[in-house]
Amino acid sequence: MFAVVLLLLPLLSAASPSKLVDRHDDNDHSHTAEKRLPSTWYHDAAHPVHELFRRGAPTDGATYPVVGSDAWAKAYPPGPPASPDVTQLPTEWVNALNAAVARGAIPNIPPSTSSDGNNPVYPNGLDPNGPEVCSSTEKCRIDGDIWDAPDGYVGISFDDGPEAGTQTLLTFLDQQKQQVTHFMIGSNLINQPNDFLAAFNRGDDIAVHTWTHPQMTTKSNLEVVAELGWTMKIIHDSTGGRVPKFWRPPYGDSDKRVSAIAKAVFGLTTIIWNQDTEDWSLTETPPGTTADKIKASMQQWLTGPKNPGLIILEHELSTDSSNSFIAAYPVMQQNGWKLASLAQLMGNNASYFNAANSGSAVSGVLDIIPAANATKSSGSSASAAPSGSSSSSNSSSNHSNANAQ
Ligand SMILES: [Zn+2]
């Protein structure tokens, strides 16, 4: 794998975009990551992350704050622009980072600098494409990170939620009985707790997309811990104690240091993508793309080769971005793709370390987490039983095939 990356470096460098957008090249990937998925999945079962998030039964008759309540929201740091204060981190997170550094698990790469959406620049002349840094913004693939779905599959995921497009998306997914993955921004949960609960309670995978959505390679080790840790904690606290297994770096911006912190401290697997709709720019001023352009891109990808499978970058930022997925969904079906959430693709539908799958209970807690108020903002989806919705998905019956590849 390493040799393959080295051989491809000149090609990757030449193809690197000046902006943080993905670009697909049929020659720029191997199938190594995809073949690795099933066999490595449960190797992390004894990961020390279990010591960082331990939610036992409430003591002394106390109860956990209700999701969406003021008491619940007050337990977390402010949202963007600044990353959470690193002097306020739980001691055990800092100790876990220090232990990982001490055992040589975290490469000593300096943070990059970058200005708004531009590619990261490293000090001391470090090559972002070199084997020491291996910047995912430059399409360098770190061993263990995920870029491709298994052949024949579309792994469906949405970034940046909960946001303005979440309700539109969930209503459609309920109609289709389709399970997906949500890479959620931790601080967004504070703003839209009911939409978060609607996604979780329908059985979707809840994954990590950082607390304030920064370019993570620009952050210090402690800031990386803060961005990941607080997002894991709010998901853990708000899902009856589940500990998420996946994260996606905002802008796809990671490197060997950031990816190693995610894995060594929190057990998180980094998931990027191999196609980008640029749907995030639909609501820019002026818009960076159009529904027609996205439709044309989708048509091209979905009628193209099925090896490797597709992981398409999509967002629940706006109704327009959600509608771009909705428009493409029948094209996926008509072209014979098997559709699945990332957890369904990558290991017995396990999107959490301590739950068998998205819909199964963590010992001693409820499957359905009540919201702070009785009025659900996402209509019927909030009351759907997760175990039923995921097992009835049209993709879950093919799951064993994914593992066999
Ligand atoms: Zn994002």
Image (tube, grey):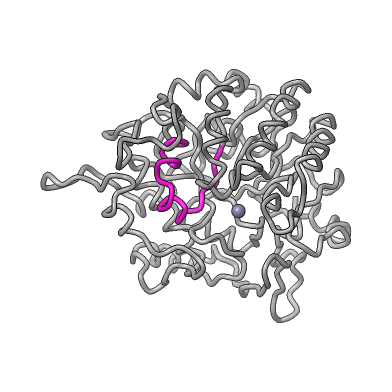
Q: Residue 112's spot in the image, x, y percent?
A: 65, 73
Q: Which residues are magenta?
A: 181-199
Q: Nearer the viewer, residue 72 or 375?
A: 375
Residue 195 within the magenta-colored segment of the rendering? yes
In the rendered image, is residue 396 in sight? yes
Magenta segment, principal secondary structure? helix
Rendering quarter of residue 405 = top right
Q: Choose between 10 and 287: the one closer to the eye.
A: 287
* Residue 67 as seen in the image, left or right of residue 318: left
Q: Position of residue 140 (x, y in %)?
A: 75, 57
The furthest residue to the bottom? 124
Disc count in the image?
Answer: 0
Left/right placement of residue 115 relative to residue 374 reads right
Q: Residue at x 72, y 59 (%)?
A: 137
Q: Position of residue 72 (x, y in %)?
A: 30, 52
Residue 186's spot in the image, x, y percent? 46, 54
The quarter of the picture where residue 8 lies is bottom right
Nearest the viewer among 100 and 374 is: 374
Residue that appears at 70% across and 75% down: 122
Identify whether 21 is placed above or below 296.
below
Horizontally, residue 83 falls left or right of residue 133, namely left
Q: Is residue 48 visible?
A: no
Q: Is residue 322 magenta?
A: no
Q: Name the residue furthest left.
A: 60
Give the residue drawn at x 35%, y 62%: 92
The residue that appears at 57% across and 64% down in the rendered structure is 214
In the image, farthest residue toward the front = 286
Residue 286, picture quadrant: bottom right
